[in-house]
Protein backbone atom coordinates (compact mmCIF):
# COMPACT_ATOMS: atom_id res chain seq x y z
CA UNK A 1 0.00 0.00 0.00
CA UNK A 2 1.27 3.47 -0.93
CA UNK A 3 0.00 6.63 0.77
CA UNK A 4 0.72 10.05 -0.79
CA UNK A 5 0.53 13.03 1.59
CA UNK A 6 0.64 16.63 0.33
CA UNK A 7 2.29 18.04 3.43
CA UNK A 8 5.43 17.34 5.43
CA UNK A 9 4.58 14.86 8.17
CA UNK A 10 5.96 15.12 11.68
CA UNK A 11 7.63 12.06 13.16
CA UNK A 12 4.57 11.41 15.34
CA UNK A 13 2.15 11.72 12.41
CA UNK A 14 4.27 9.36 10.31
CA UNK A 15 4.44 6.82 13.14
CA UNK A 16 0.66 6.88 13.62
CA UNK A 17 0.07 6.32 9.91
CA UNK A 18 2.66 3.51 9.78
CA UNK A 19 1.06 1.75 12.74
CA UNK A 20 -2.51 2.10 11.43
CA UNK A 21 -1.60 0.95 7.92
CA UNK A 22 0.53 -2.01 8.95
CA UNK A 23 3.68 -0.57 7.38
CA UNK A 24 2.55 1.22 4.21
CA UNK A 25 5.00 3.16 2.05
CA UNK A 26 4.44 6.85 2.82
CA UNK A 27 5.35 9.56 0.31
CA UNK A 28 5.00 13.03 1.84
CA UNK A 29 6.05 16.64 1.37
CA UNK A 30 4.33 17.27 -1.97
CA UNK A 31 2.77 20.62 -2.85
CA UNK A 32 -0.82 20.18 -4.12
CA UNK A 33 -0.42 23.37 -6.17
CA UNK A 34 2.47 21.77 -8.08
CA UNK A 35 0.73 18.66 -9.43
CA UNK A 36 3.34 17.99 -12.12
CA UNK A 37 5.96 17.23 -9.47
CA UNK A 38 3.81 14.56 -7.84
CA UNK A 39 2.64 12.81 -11.01
CA UNK A 40 5.13 9.93 -10.74
CA UNK A 41 3.95 9.27 -7.18
CA UNK A 42 0.29 9.62 -8.17
CA UNK A 43 0.62 6.93 -10.81
CA UNK A 44 0.68 4.06 -8.32
CA UNK A 45 -0.58 5.43 -5.00
CA UNK A 46 -3.56 3.83 -3.25
CA UNK A 47 -4.47 6.61 -0.80
CA UNK A 48 -4.05 10.38 -0.94
CA UNK A 49 -4.13 12.77 2.03
CA UNK A 50 -4.40 16.41 0.99
CA UNK A 51 -5.94 19.84 1.42
CA UNK A 52 -6.42 20.23 -2.34
CA UNK A 53 -6.89 17.70 -5.12
CA UNK A 54 -5.21 18.01 -8.53
CA UNK A 55 -7.45 17.81 -11.59
CA UNK A 56 -7.77 14.68 -13.76
CA UNK A 57 -6.98 12.22 -10.98
CA UNK A 58 -8.95 9.49 -12.74
CA UNK A 59 -6.15 9.35 -15.33
CA UNK A 60 -3.18 10.47 -13.24
CA UNK A 61 -3.90 8.11 -10.34
CA UNK A 62 -5.59 5.02 -11.81
CA UNK A 63 -4.92 2.92 -8.68
CA UNK A 64 -6.27 5.52 -6.25
CA UNK A 65 -8.95 4.09 -3.97
CA UNK A 66 -9.46 6.79 -1.36
CA UNK A 67 -8.80 10.51 -0.80
CA UNK A 68 -8.89 12.00 2.68
CA UNK A 69 -9.22 15.79 2.80
CA UNK A 70 -7.55 17.64 5.66
CA UNK A 71 -10.33 20.23 5.39
CA UNK A 72 -14.09 20.00 5.92
CA UNK A 73 -15.25 21.66 2.69
CA UNK A 74 -15.27 19.36 -0.34
CA UNK A 75 -16.62 21.56 -3.15
CA UNK A 76 -13.11 22.20 -4.52
CA UNK A 77 -12.47 18.45 -4.76
CA UNK A 78 -15.78 17.88 -6.54
CA UNK A 79 -14.95 20.71 -8.97
CA UNK A 80 -11.63 18.98 -9.70
CA UNK A 81 -13.55 15.89 -10.80
CA UNK A 82 -12.61 13.42 -8.07
CA UNK A 83 -15.78 11.45 -8.68
CA UNK A 84 -14.87 10.85 -12.32
CA UNK A 85 -13.47 7.68 -10.78
CA UNK A 86 -16.70 5.81 -9.96
CA UNK A 87 -15.08 3.71 -7.24
CA UNK A 88 -13.18 6.43 -5.40
CA UNK A 89 -13.93 7.05 -1.71
CA UNK A 90 -13.75 10.63 -0.42
CA UNK A 91 -13.66 11.56 3.26
CA UNK A 92 -13.02 14.83 5.06
CA UNK A 93 -11.84 16.06 8.46
CA UNK A 94 -15.22 17.30 9.64
CA UNK A 95 -15.43 17.29 13.43
CA UNK A 96 -12.07 18.82 14.23
CA UNK A 97 -13.36 22.36 13.65
CA UNK A 98 -16.24 22.23 16.12
CA UNK A 99 -14.49 23.69 19.15
CA UNK A 100 -12.61 26.46 17.35
CA UNK A 101 -15.43 27.60 15.09
CA UNK A 102 -18.02 27.17 17.85
CA UNK A 103 -15.98 29.55 20.02
CA UNK A 104 -15.64 31.93 17.08
CA UNK A 105 -19.43 32.00 16.63
CA UNK A 106 -19.99 32.65 20.33
CA UNK A 107 -17.35 35.38 20.14
CA UNK A 108 -19.15 37.01 17.22
CA UNK A 109 -22.47 36.95 19.07
CA UNK A 110 -20.86 38.37 22.21
CA UNK A 111 -19.14 41.09 20.20
CA UNK A 112 -22.48 42.18 18.79
CA UNK A 113 -24.42 41.86 22.06
CA UNK A 114 -21.83 44.06 23.78
CA UNK A 115 -21.41 46.37 20.76
CA UNK A 116 -17.64 45.77 20.74
CA UNK A 117 -17.46 46.48 17.02
CA UNK A 118 -18.26 50.14 17.67
CA UNK A 119 -15.37 51.02 20.02
CA UNK A 120 -13.04 49.01 17.76
CA UNK A 121 -13.94 51.26 14.85
CA UNK A 122 -13.79 54.32 17.13
CA UNK A 123 -10.31 53.29 18.31
CA UNK A 124 -9.02 53.71 14.75
CA UNK A 125 -10.42 57.27 14.81
CA UNK A 126 -8.98 57.93 18.31
CA UNK A 127 -12.54 58.57 19.51
CA UNK A 128 -13.86 57.82 23.02
CA UNK A 129 -17.52 56.80 22.79
CA UNK A 130 -19.93 57.93 25.54
CA UNK A 131 -21.14 55.33 28.02
CA UNK A 132 -24.78 56.31 27.63
CA UNK A 133 -25.00 54.78 24.15
CA UNK A 134 -24.05 51.33 25.43
CA UNK A 135 -26.51 51.58 28.32
CA UNK A 136 -29.26 51.68 25.69
CA UNK A 137 -27.98 49.06 23.24
CA UNK A 138 -26.05 46.29 25.03
CA UNK A 139 -28.00 43.11 25.86
CA UNK A 140 -27.39 39.66 27.35
CA UNK A 141 -27.17 36.45 25.33
CA UNK A 142 -29.16 34.75 28.08
CA UNK A 143 -32.74 34.37 26.94
CA UNK A 144 -31.96 34.93 23.27
CA UNK A 145 -32.52 32.32 20.54
CA UNK A 146 -29.84 30.92 18.25
CA UNK A 147 -31.18 29.44 15.02
CA UNK A 148 -28.51 27.12 13.62
CA UNK A 149 -28.80 26.57 9.87
CA UNK A 150 -26.85 23.34 9.35
CA UNK A 151 -26.72 21.14 12.45
CA UNK A 152 -23.45 19.34 11.83
CA UNK A 153 -20.40 19.13 14.07
CA UNK A 154 -19.87 22.91 14.12
CA UNK A 155 -23.53 23.68 14.73
CA UNK A 156 -23.71 21.12 17.52
CA UNK A 157 -20.72 22.49 19.41
CA UNK A 158 -22.12 25.99 18.96
CA UNK A 159 -25.39 24.73 20.46
CA UNK A 160 -23.57 23.25 23.46
CA UNK A 161 -21.80 26.55 24.14
CA UNK A 162 -24.92 28.64 23.49
CA UNK A 163 -26.87 26.51 25.97
CA UNK A 164 -24.23 27.29 28.60
CA UNK A 165 -24.94 30.98 28.01
CA UNK A 166 -28.62 30.40 28.67
CA UNK A 167 -29.70 30.60 25.04
CA UNK A 168 -32.45 28.60 23.38
CA UNK A 169 -31.40 26.63 20.29
CA UNK A 170 -33.33 25.92 17.08
CA UNK A 171 -31.77 23.53 14.54
CA UNK A 172 -32.17 23.09 10.79
CA UNK A 173 -31.02 19.85 9.19
CA UNK A 174 -31.57 18.16 5.84
CA UNK A 175 -33.44 15.38 7.64
CA UNK A 176 -34.85 16.93 10.83
CA UNK A 177 -36.17 13.56 12.00
CA UNK A 178 -32.66 12.08 12.25
CA UNK A 179 -31.18 13.89 15.24
CA UNK A 180 -27.91 11.95 15.64
CA UNK A 181 -24.48 12.88 14.28
CA UNK A 182 -22.58 9.84 13.01
CA UNK A 183 -19.42 11.63 11.92
CA UNK A 184 -16.11 11.93 13.77
CA UNK A 185 -16.53 13.67 17.12
CA UNK A 186 -14.04 14.36 19.92
CA UNK A 187 -15.14 13.22 23.39
CA UNK A 188 -17.22 15.77 25.28
CA UNK A 189 -17.73 18.00 22.25
CA UNK A 190 -20.95 18.95 20.51
CA UNK A 191 -24.36 17.35 20.74
CA UNK A 192 -23.93 13.88 19.14
CA UNK A 193 -27.42 12.67 20.04
CA UNK A 194 -29.19 15.92 19.17
CA UNK A 195 -30.58 16.57 22.64
CA UNK A 196 -30.13 20.36 22.82
CA UNK A 197 -32.44 21.96 20.21
CA UNK A 198 -35.90 22.96 21.38
CA UNK A 199 -37.26 22.56 17.84
CA UNK A 200 -36.06 20.97 14.59
CA UNK A 201 -36.65 22.26 11.07
CA UNK A 202 -36.12 20.94 7.54
CA UNK A 203 -34.85 23.07 4.63
CA UNK A 204 -38.39 23.89 3.51
CA UNK A 205 -39.13 25.24 7.02
CA UNK A 206 -36.28 27.73 7.14
CA UNK A 207 -38.60 30.75 7.28
CA UNK A 208 -40.07 29.41 10.52
CA UNK A 209 -36.60 29.05 12.03
CA UNK A 210 -35.62 32.55 10.95
CA UNK A 211 -38.77 34.09 12.42
CA UNK A 212 -37.88 32.59 15.78
CA UNK A 213 -34.16 33.49 15.87
CA UNK A 214 -32.32 36.45 17.35
CA UNK A 215 -29.08 35.06 15.88
CA UNK A 216 -29.08 33.25 12.53
CA UNK A 217 -26.00 31.00 12.47
CA UNK A 218 -25.06 29.56 9.08
CA UNK A 219 -22.75 26.53 8.96
CA UNK A 220 -23.98 24.93 5.71
CA UNK A 221 -21.62 23.39 3.15
CA UNK A 222 -21.85 24.68 -0.42
CA UNK A 223 -23.84 22.40 -2.72
CA UNK A 224 -26.32 23.06 -5.55
CA UNK A 225 -29.10 22.79 -2.95
CA UNK A 226 -27.57 25.32 -0.53
CA UNK A 227 -26.44 28.06 -2.94
CA UNK A 228 -28.31 31.26 -1.93
CA UNK A 229 -30.14 29.26 0.73
CA UNK A 230 -30.73 32.57 2.50
CA UNK A 231 -31.79 35.59 0.49
CA UNK A 232 -34.25 38.48 0.34
CA UNK A 233 -37.29 36.33 1.18
CA UNK A 234 -35.60 34.92 4.27
CA UNK A 235 -34.21 38.23 5.52
CA UNK A 236 -37.64 39.83 5.12
CA UNK A 237 -38.92 37.37 7.75
CA UNK A 238 -36.10 37.99 10.23
CA UNK A 239 -36.76 39.49 13.64
CA UNK A 240 -35.98 43.20 13.93
CA UNK A 241 -32.22 43.67 14.40
CA UNK A 242 -31.45 39.95 14.02
CA UNK A 243 -27.75 39.19 13.63
CA UNK A 244 -26.31 36.79 11.01
CA UNK A 245 -23.14 34.73 11.54
CA UNK A 246 -21.83 32.90 8.47
CA UNK A 247 -18.97 30.41 8.84
CA UNK A 248 -20.13 28.04 6.06
CA UNK A 249 -19.51 29.43 2.57
CA UNK A 250 -20.16 32.89 1.20
CA UNK A 251 -22.32 31.60 -1.66
CA UNK A 252 -24.81 30.04 0.79
CA UNK A 253 -26.11 33.58 1.34
CA UNK A 254 -27.30 35.96 -1.39
CA UNK A 255 -24.75 38.61 -0.49
CA UNK A 256 -26.49 41.48 -2.30
CA UNK A 257 -29.74 40.71 -0.49
CA UNK A 258 -27.90 40.61 2.84
CA UNK A 259 -26.24 43.96 2.13
CA UNK A 260 -29.63 45.50 1.38
CA UNK A 261 -31.08 44.05 4.60
CA UNK A 262 -28.15 45.47 6.58
CA UNK A 263 -28.40 48.90 4.98
CA UNK A 264 -32.14 49.09 5.58
CA UNK A 265 -31.75 48.12 9.23
CA UNK A 266 -33.80 44.96 8.82
CA UNK A 267 -30.75 42.99 9.95
CA UNK A 268 -28.95 44.36 12.99
CA UNK A 269 -25.55 43.15 11.89
CA UNK A 270 -23.48 40.32 10.50
CA UNK A 271 -20.37 38.42 11.50
CA UNK A 272 -18.84 37.05 8.31
CA UNK A 273 -15.88 34.71 8.12
CA UNK A 274 -16.80 33.81 4.54
CA UNK A 275 -17.80 36.08 1.65
CA UNK A 276 -18.29 36.18 -2.11
CA UNK A 277 -15.66 36.31 -3.50
CA UNK A 278 -12.66 35.55 -1.31
CA UNK A 279 -10.64 37.68 -0.84
CA UNK A 280 -13.51 40.15 -0.64
CA UNK A 281 -13.44 42.86 -3.31
CA UNK A 282 -12.06 46.09 -1.85
CA UNK A 283 -15.07 47.94 -3.29
CA UNK A 284 -17.62 45.82 -1.43
CA UNK A 285 -19.98 47.80 0.84
CA UNK A 286 -19.44 45.17 3.54
CA UNK A 287 -16.12 46.78 4.48
CA UNK A 288 -17.83 49.98 5.62
CA UNK A 289 -21.14 48.86 7.12
CA UNK A 290 -20.73 49.67 10.78
CA UNK A 291 -22.43 46.56 12.18
CA UNK A 292 -20.45 44.06 10.09
CA UNK A 293 -17.52 42.10 11.49
CA UNK A 294 -15.29 40.66 8.74
CA UNK A 295 -12.60 38.02 9.14
CA UNK A 296 -10.63 36.37 6.30
CA UNK A 297 -11.92 32.76 6.51
CA UNK A 298 -9.92 32.00 9.64
CA UNK A 299 -12.56 30.73 12.07
CA UNK A 300 -11.21 27.16 11.84
CA UNK A 301 -7.52 28.01 12.00
CA UNK A 302 -5.65 26.92 15.14
CA UNK A 303 -2.44 25.48 16.51
CA UNK A 304 -2.28 21.71 16.12
CA UNK A 305 -4.76 21.67 13.23
CA UNK A 306 -2.77 19.16 11.15
CA UNK A 307 -2.37 16.84 14.14
CA UNK A 308 -6.13 16.69 14.68
CA UNK A 309 -6.88 16.18 10.98
CA UNK A 310 -4.27 13.41 10.97
CA UNK A 311 -6.05 11.72 13.89
CA UNK A 312 -9.26 11.56 11.85
CA UNK A 313 -7.33 10.08 8.91
CA UNK A 314 -5.60 7.52 11.12
CA UNK A 315 -8.91 6.37 12.61
CA UNK A 316 -10.29 5.97 9.10
CA UNK A 317 -7.10 4.24 7.96
CA UNK A 318 -7.60 1.57 10.62
CA UNK A 319 -11.15 1.13 9.37
CA UNK A 320 -10.00 1.01 5.74
CA UNK A 321 -7.44 -1.73 6.45
CA UNK A 322 -10.02 -3.70 8.43
CA UNK A 323 -12.72 -3.31 5.78
CA UNK A 324 -15.01 -1.32 8.11
CA UNK A 325 -17.17 1.69 7.11
CA UNK A 326 -15.31 5.01 7.02
CA UNK A 327 -16.27 8.08 9.02
CA UNK A 328 -17.08 11.36 7.25
CA UNK A 329 -17.69 9.63 3.92
CA UNK A 330 -18.82 12.15 1.31
CA UNK A 331 -22.12 11.27 -0.34
CA UNK A 332 -21.78 11.38 -4.13
CA UNK A 333 -25.39 12.43 -4.64
CA UNK A 334 -25.55 15.18 -1.99
CA UNK A 335 -22.02 16.53 -2.50
CA UNK A 336 -21.04 16.63 1.18
Image (cartoon, rainbow, N blue to C red):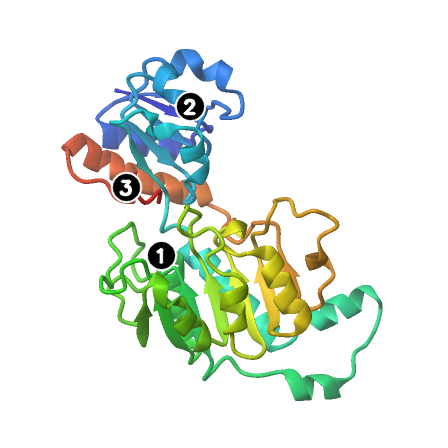
Residue shown at 31% from the left, 35% from the top = 90
Which mark sits nearer the N-terminus, 3 or 2?
Answer: 2
The kind of secondary structure element at disc 2 is loop
User: Which residue in the structure is indicated by mark 3?
Assistant: 329
Q: Earlier in the sequence, mark 1 or mark 2?
A: 2
Where on the picture, by quarter, is residue 160? Answer: bottom left
How far apart in space, not on screen, are marks 3 and 1 (Cα)? 14 Å
Measured as percent of width and height from the top left, residue 110 is found at: 56, 72
Question: Is 85 situated left or right of 288 in this image?
Answer: left
Q: Which residue is outermost to the right?
A: 126
- Residue 166: x percent and y percent? 42, 81
Which callout, 3 or 1, points at the residue further toward the start of the chain? 1
The image's mark for residue 88 is none
Image quarter of the N terminus: top left
Q: CA distance from mark 3 to mark 2?
A: 23 Å
**Nearest to the observer: residue 186 or residue 257:** 257
Tags 3 and 1 in contact by the CB under 8 Å rule?
Answer: no
Circle 1 packing at 10 Å, graded few (<14), some (14-19), many (20+), is many
On the image, numbered disc 2 is attached to which residue?
A: 28
Q: Nearer the viewer, mark 1 or mark 2?
A: 1
For disc 1, the marked residue is 153
Amino acid sequence: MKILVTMRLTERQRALIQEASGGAEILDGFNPFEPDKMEPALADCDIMVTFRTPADLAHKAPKLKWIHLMSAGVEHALAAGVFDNPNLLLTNSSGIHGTTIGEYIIGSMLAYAHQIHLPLRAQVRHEWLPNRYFMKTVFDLRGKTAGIVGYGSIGRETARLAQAFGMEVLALKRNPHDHADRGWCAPGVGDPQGLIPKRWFGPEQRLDLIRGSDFIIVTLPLTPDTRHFLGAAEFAEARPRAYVVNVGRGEVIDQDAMIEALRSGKLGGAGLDVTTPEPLDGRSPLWDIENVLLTPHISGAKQGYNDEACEVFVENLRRFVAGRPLLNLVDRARGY
